[in-house]
Structure formats: structure tokens, C-alpha cells
Image (spheres, rainbow, N blue to C red):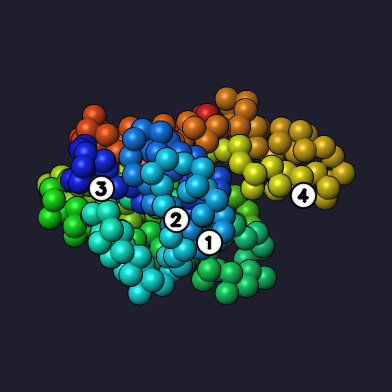
């Protein structure tokens, strides 16, 4: 899928200052695309952008419709319309449902579900007008399964898949595809920190926590590499994936 300006596609990736989003931004940059990092953390976003070719960072609260609209209008004015949108921003909070703080519930659904909605809402019309576009939503294996103490995260990730399929139905005849990627346990700093905390609580090692809590569910018997998730994003954004829409595709090493 060729970009509409100077042959370069304009790619927006949310939550791309670190983790999976950062890996996806790098993959598109290495592919020769012009990447826009949208992240609430201004300094981390700038640092991530400076490490990549033809990349720019925008400090954006994706739960604020006015901020989303202003940032995307600036991208359009400075670079052209968005060809590829990757809705990746996410966060976690763990608590039994009876003590789950309502503000945390709202925060998680705001970022992962409402943020995905707002970003999509403000790019899809331009994609339809140009007759081409790719929207890729990062859900999770928890978008199809469940585990305790993650009610908001799981509700949001299930919602992302439903939203993906609904918008895919609306855009399928207009050259715009909408798909979801469902990563399993990915080797990121966030996950490693979580394993350290679990190990401290249980009096075990991070390696034992990894084996007990994650690899027991992931038959590939290792963490997924960020590049493996990014590789699927590149494919879904390509011409070769023009007939793929409304799908929820796992990159999860056989997670069960």
C-alpha cells in the first residue's frame, strides 16, 4: 500500500515510547515509513523518536477527543493523512473485582477501548476518502480468555476485538482493513518487572515465576519477541493483506 505523499506511508502508533509499541514503531521506520509516535510520556516519546529514522513524537492523551483531533490535524497538516494506524497504548491494574477502584476501571477502559475508538474515529474518514488505509488494534490473548484480578484489562481487550470487527464491517468495501493482533506474553521491560515483583512476593526467582505463571500457558516455552508482533503488524499493513479484515490473530506461541 503506497503512501499518498512522496511514496512514504504515514504511520501513527499509540503508546510507542516503550514496549510493544516501540518495537512496532521501529519495524515501520526500518521499513521506510514515516512514523508518528503518540504517547502521554513526552520525554520517553521524544527519546524513542530520536532513535529512529524519519520519526516524530507527539504528546497526546488519547482519552481526550479534543487532543486526539488536534494532534491528528497537525499530522495531516505537516505530513499528510494517516495511512496506517496502530492502536497499541495500554496499561494494567490488578485487583479483586470487589475492591477494584472505579477510577482505575475508567482509566484502563479509557486508554485501551475509548482511546482506540477516538483514534479510529478521527482517521477513518480520511482513509475512506483516499480509498485505502490500515487500522491495526493491539488486543491480547486475554481478549479471548480470562484470568482473575484483571477485570478491567480483560473487559477492554475483549471490547477491542468486538470494536475491530464492527469497524471492519463498515469499511470493508472502501479499501480500509481493520484487524486485531493478540499477543501472548511478550518479552518487555514491563513484563520483566512484573515477574520480579511476583518472585519477591513468592520468595522465588524471576525464572521460576516465569515458568509457573506464564510459560505453563505458552507451549512455545519462551516469551514472544517484540519483533514477532511487529512483523505481523507489517504484514497486516501491506498490500498482501488487502483481503484480511475483521480478524483477531494471535501471536502467542500456542497460548492456552
Judged from the image, the secondary structure of the residue bearing numbered disc 2 is: strand
Q: Residue at x 23, y 54 (%)?
A: 80
CA gap between label 4 and label 1 equals 27 Å
Closer to the camera: disc 2 or disc 4? 2
Q: Position of residue 140 (x, y in %)?
A: 48, 45
Identify the residue at horizontal 47%, vertical 63% (top origin). 59
Give the Cα separation between the discs numbered 2 and 1: 8 Å
Q: In the picture shown, does residue 139 fall above or below 115?
A: above
Q: Residues within 10 Å of mark 3 (few under 14, many from 20)?
A: many
Looking at the rendered image, the disc whose residue lies closer to the viewer, 3 or 2, is 2
Residue under pointer 4: 197
Mark 1 and mark 3 residues within 8 Å of each other at the beta carbon: no
Q: CA distance from mark 3 to mark 2?
A: 17 Å
Q: Earlier in the sequence, mark 4 or mark 3?
A: 3
Q: Nearer the viewer, mark 4 or mark 1?
A: 1
Q: Earlier in the sequence, mark 2 or mark 4?
A: 2
Position of the C terminus, as image quadrant, is top right
**Residue at point 33% right, 70% down?**
70
Q: Which numbered disc, 2 or 1, marks the residue that appears first in the sequence?
A: 1
The numbered mark at residue 42 is 1
Vertical position of residue 213 compared to residue 71: above or below: above
- Mark 3 in CB contact with mark 2 (< 8 angstroms): no
Q: Which residue is mark 2?
A: 57
Q: Residue at x 42, y 40 (%)?
A: 53
Left or right of 21: which side holds 191? right
Closer to the camera in the image, 35 or 197: 35
Check residue 83 in the rendering and tell me which mark sits there, or answer none: 3
Q: Left or right of 145: which side holds 165?
A: left
Mark 2 vs 1: CB contact within 8 A: yes
Estimate the spatial distance between the alpha carbons at disc 2 and disc 4, rounded to whole Å: 31 Å
The answer to whether any part of residue 77 appears in the image is yes
Q: Is residue 79 left or right of residue 97?
A: left
Amino acid at each position: 500500500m503506497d503512501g499518498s505523499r512522496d511514496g512514504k506511508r504515514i504511520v501513527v502508533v499509540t503508546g510507542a515510547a516503550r514496549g510493544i509499541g516501540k518495537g512496532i514503531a521501529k519495524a515501520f521506520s526500518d521499513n521506510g515509513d514515516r512514523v508518528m509516535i503518540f504517547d502521554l510520556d513526552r520525554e520517553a516519546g521524544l527519546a524513542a523518536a530520536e532513535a529512529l529514522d524519519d520519526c516524530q513524537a507527539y504528546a497526546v492523551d488519547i482519552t481526550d477527543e479534543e487532543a486526539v483531533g488536534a494532534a491528528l490535524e497537525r499530522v495531516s497538516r505537516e505530513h499528510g493523512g494517516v495511512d496506517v494506524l496502530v492502536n497499541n497504548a495500554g496499561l494494567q491494574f490488578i485487583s479483586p473485582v470487589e475492591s477494584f477502584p472505579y477510577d482505575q476501571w475508567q482509566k484502563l477502559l479509557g486508554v485501551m477501548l475509548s482511546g482506540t475508538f477516538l483514534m479510529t474515529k478521527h482517521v477513518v474518514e480520511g482513509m475512506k476518502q483516499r480509498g485505502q488505509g490500515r487500522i491495526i488494534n493491539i488486543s491480547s490473548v486475554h481478549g479471548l480468555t480470562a484470568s482473575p484480578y484483571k477485570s478491567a484489562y480483560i473487559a477492554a481487550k475483549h471490547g477491542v476485538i468486538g470494536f475491530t470487527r464492527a469497524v471492519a464491517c463498515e469499511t470493508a468495501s472502501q479499501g480500509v482493513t481493520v484487524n486485531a493482533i493478540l499477543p501472548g506474553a511478550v518479552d518487555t521491560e514491563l513484563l520483566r518487572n512484573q515477574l520480579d515483583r511476583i518472585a519477591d512476593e513468592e520468595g522465588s526467582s524471576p525464572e521460576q515465576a516465569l515458568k509457573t505463571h506464564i510459560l505453563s500457558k505458552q507451549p512455545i516455552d519462551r516469551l514472544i519477541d517484540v519483533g514477532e508482533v511487529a512483523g505481523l503488524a507489517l504484514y497486516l499493513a501491506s498490500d498482501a493483506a488487502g483481503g484480511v479484515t475483521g480478524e483477531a490473530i494471535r501471536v502467542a506461541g500456542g497460548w492456552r
